[in-house]
Amino acid sequence: MPSKMLERVLSLRRGAPQHGEEGSGDNDDDDTADESKTKKQQLPLTTRAANYFTRMGPMGPCLAFLSLTFLAILSLLIFHSRPFVCVSSYNPVSRSGFFGLDGLESDFGSLGVPWCRSKHGKTVEWTPKDLLKGLEEFVPIYETRPIKNNMYGMGFDHSFGLWFIVRWLKPNLMIESGAFKGHSTWVLRQAMPNTPIVSLSPRHPERYLKKGPAYVDGNCTYFAGKEFVDFGSVDWGSVMKKHGITDLSRVLIFFDDHQDELKRIKQALKAGFQHLVFEDNYDTGTGDHYSLRQICDQFYIRGGGHSCFKDSDEARIRSKRKKFWEKAMDIEEVCGADEAWWGVRGYMRDNFNHSNQPISYAQHFQNSRFLESILDVYWELPPVAGPSLTHQTRYDPARAPSPIVEDGRYGLFQRLGLTRLDTSVFNGYTQMVYLQISK
Ligand SMILES: C[S@@+](CC[C@H](N)C(=O)[O-])C[C@H]1O[C@@H](n2cnc3c(N)ncnc32)[C@H](O)[C@@H]1O
């Protein structure tokens, strides 16, 4: 069974449970889960085999040849019987077999993680330790969520990211664009119990209540249903006045409305807002709207700029990864007509891909220069935990920053309560991003 095999792979990676590890997870804050630090050094198998055959005298080389032939036949048999053994092509066991056990750890960011340069190189104040502490607090909160199945909405990673950012910034007003059944409204409310919310969504979340769980907030002004107004058309001056907001640096905007992010940034800038979070910061070649990730995918950034040459290293690596990660794309999918790789195959998408405009490379490059001129901070939320822990199969770690809980740290994963969650909640990671902007 694949899950049994996975357990074996994981326990190999962890080594034998140490006293106080696993059950209590007590040892996780020091690095005892890192087997490279706890295992005794041994001679490599090949060296030990060579020593053995040398000791056998003249019969040694003959026996060595026979053993190698036997091993070669055995490995051929195993290789060819794989399709009958594997249940799914996204089996994490075959992934670890393919990339090597150590590959799981080094996998993150191996194809580069494009990021947007800020004006003065400023970054966020929080540290990986703060994120870990936040996770410990957030898991029990997440377990009380009213909408257990939030398909098409946010999963665990982004719910945590939004909650964490909001808790850290403590805004005086929270604005959300794209509410669906209200899960993200609920997350905002958990982070700031008494702060007013303004929510914009064409369909009012209460409409979903007829069919099942939804969340409607008591301290939220809804521009929804018949009262819906798009973010770009709201008279923000009068909304701020109504809420008694004079300092726009204390307002946070959360976008999960699948609109061109450059368009949204220009609208937010015009209104004077400074703190923005985008839920779906899609990677180049993917998604239904032009994103920050796509805009900042430029040749001068590591992992940015792409060659559509089918014999390139990137093309080879991508085509292998595609077999293991559902959203990984090979270079032919990244590249469109005339080798256009920027945006989505040379197109700037908007409004859930209902609008799909071609964009020139020069325009795309200009967009990144514009972004750099107004960006004070750019921070991508890392995935919560490595795929051997979450069993996620969708995003490709090669294009993501290292996770908060790294592969191999099962004790910590368990201690944080993450083993209690259904693995499906880890499947929606799309590089949520926090921005600080100014003219
Ligand atoms: C992915 S869902 C949002 C998920 C939600 N944030 C959650 O956590 O469950 C996208 C939502 O955006 C809404 N939407 C579509 N166009 C919009 C627009 N122009 N402004 C705001 N919301 C929009 C859709 O109706 C849908 O409810």
Image (spheres, rainbow, N blue to C red):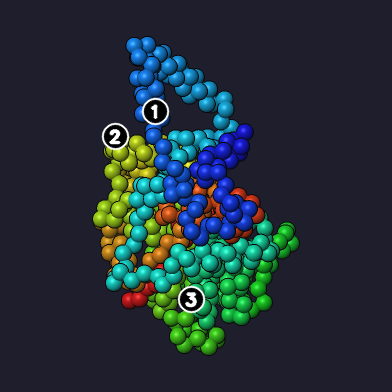
Element at label 1: helix
Mark 2 or mark 1: name the one nearer the start of the chain. 1
Above or below residue 58? Residue 276 is: below
Residue 249 on image: x %, y %: 43, 81
Describe residue 193's horizontal placement relative to residue 431 as left or right. right
Say which quadrant the C terminus sits in: bottom left
Q: Foreground residue, 426 or 237?
A: 426
Q: Is residue 265 visible?
A: no
The residue tagged 1 is: 48
The amino acid at mark 1 is: Arg
**Does mark 2's beta carbon lie closer than 8 Å to ligand 1?**
no
Residue at horizontal 33 percent and vertical 71 percent from the top: 122
Describe residue 385's horizontal placement relative to residue 108 as left or right. right
The residue tagged 3 is: 169
Element at label 2: loop
In this rendering, which labeled residue sits more in front, label 3 or label 2? 3
Mark 3 or mark 2: name the one nearer the start of the chain. 3
Mark 3 is surrounded, within 10 Å at the Cα level, by few (under 14), some (14 to 19) or many (20 or more) other residues, namely few
In this rendering, which labeled residue sits more in front, label 3 or label 1? 1
**Does mark 1's beta carbon lie closer than 8 Å to ligand 1?**
no
Residue at horizontal 51 percent and vertical 60 percent from the top: 29
> Does the CB distance between marks 2 and 1 fall below 8 Å?
no
Mark 3 or mark 1: name the one nearer the start of the chain. 1
Residue at horizontal 52 percent and vertical 72 percent from the top: 166
State the separation of the CA atoms marked 3 and 2: 47 Å
Q: Which mark is residue 311?
A: 2
Mark 1 is surrounded, within 10 Å at the Cα level, by few (under 14), some (14 to 19) or many (20 or more) other residues, namely few
Above or below residue 100? Residue 266 is: below
Q: Foreground residue, 27 or 101?
A: 27
